[in-house]
Image (tube, grey):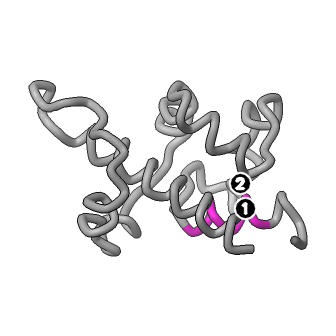
Amino acid sequence: AQVFAEKITKLVEFVFRVHKSRKTPPSVELLPPNDTNSEASTIDIEDLASIEITPEFFDHLRSYREFQDLMSDLDIADEDQLDLFDTLDVDRSGTLDIQELVFGICKLRGPA
């Protein structure tokens, strides 16, 4: 369970970094390096809660090898990642928040 929690934390941090980088001016580096010590201290819960993952943003996330690797580490097969947005969007709102993403992945994995 601790290993799963660490992987989910890395996924949430990655989503946060990519979301944050999309709001920065083009002159800024597009994706900050994965420095977990500094990253963890800069994640604001309110910012995290305000992230809306659209199908387009989810596809953007999927374009990163790091995201694909994190999903594989969480036992989400490559072929399942293609329809994952629709699977996780249980309320059919057309967007995911971080909570839906995490809970959905937990449900997909089943009991540990």
Total numbered labels: 2
- Span of residues in magenta: 99-106
Which residue extends farthest right? 111
On residue 65, which mark appears? Answer: none
Q: Is residue 9 above or below residue 56?
A: below
Residue at x-position 56% and y-position 38%:
67
Q: Which kind of residue does numbered mark 2 sit on? A: Leu
Residue at x-position 27% and y-position 40%:
32
Magenta region includes residue 37: no
Where is the C terminus found, in terms of image quarters? bottom right
What residue would you read off at disc 1? 104
Q: Could you tell me how far apart the alpha carbons at marks 1 and 2 are, in whole angstroms?
A: 5 Å
Q: Position of residue 73 (x, y in %)?
A: 71, 46
Q: Position of residue 41 (x, y in %)?
A: 26, 69
Magenta region includes residue 105: yes
**Depth check, front residue: 58 or 69:** 69
On residue 88, which mark appears? Answer: 2
Label 2: which secondary element: helix
The reply, left or right, for residue 75 in relation to residue 31 is right
Q: Position of residue 69 (x, y in %)?
A: 63, 37
